[in-house]
Image (cartoon, helix red, strand yellow):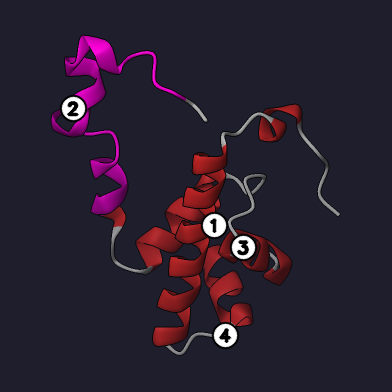
Amino acid sequence: MPKSSAHIDFLPPLALQSLKTLGEGLALARLRRKESLRSWALRMGVAVCTVQRMEKGDPGVGMRIYALAIWLMGRAQALAEVSAPEHDMAALDPAGWPMDLA
C-alpha cells in the first residue's frame, strides 16, 4: 500500500478531479490500443499496480509515470502545452490571481 503524503491531502477538489479524468483517459487510450495492463506496465518499467493507480488518477503516482503514459499515446507534445505561456491567461489578468483553489 502506498504511503500517504501530506502534499496529497492539500490538493484542491478540481485538481483531484482533473487527475481522475486524466487517468480515465489514459486507461481508455491503453484499451483502444488493445494493450493489457501487464504489457503497458512492462513498456513503462513499472508494476501493474502502478498503472492501475495511475488510471484511477492517484495523485501519489509520480509525474514520470503520467508522462510516460502520455508519450506511449503519442501525445508527448500535449504535456508541454499545459504550461505554455500563451495559455496562462490568469497571469495576464490582475484579478485572476490568486486563483480560487476550491
Q: Quadrant of the N terminus?
A: bottom right
Which residue lies under the disc numbered 1? Answer: 20
Specify which label sits upstream in the sequence, 3 or 1: 1
Circle 3: is it few (<14), some (14-19), or many (20+) Cα within 10 Å?
A: some
Residue 72, labelled with which disc? none
Q: Is residue 92 magenta?
A: yes
**Alpha carbon separation for disc pair 3 and 4:** 16 Å
Residue 54: % across, % down: 59, 59
Could you tell me which residue is drawn at 59 percent across and 45 percent down? 62
Circle 2: is it few (<14), some (14-19), or many (20+) Cα within 10 Å?
A: few
Q: Is residue 15 above or below residue 31?
A: above
Q: Circle 2 — which element? A: helix
Q: Circle 1 — which element? A: helix
Q: Is residue 42 above or below residue 62?
A: below
Which residue lies under the disc numbered 4? Answer: 36
Circle 4: is it few (<14), some (14-19), or many (20+) Cα within 10 Å?
A: few
- 92 and 60: which one is in front? 92
Q: Circle 3 — which element? A: loop
**Alpha carbon separation for disc pair 2 and 3:** 29 Å
Give the foreground label among 3 and 4. Answer: 3
**Alpha carbon separation for disc pair 4 and 1:** 20 Å
Could you tell me which residue is drawn at 23 percent across and 43 percent down? 81
Could you tell me which residue is drawn at 41 percent across and 75 percent down? 29
Residue 82: % across, % down: 29, 41
The magenta segment: 77-100
Kind of residue indicated by mark 1:
Lys
Which residue lies under the disc numbered 3? Answer: 56
Which residue lies under the disc numbered 2? Answer: 85
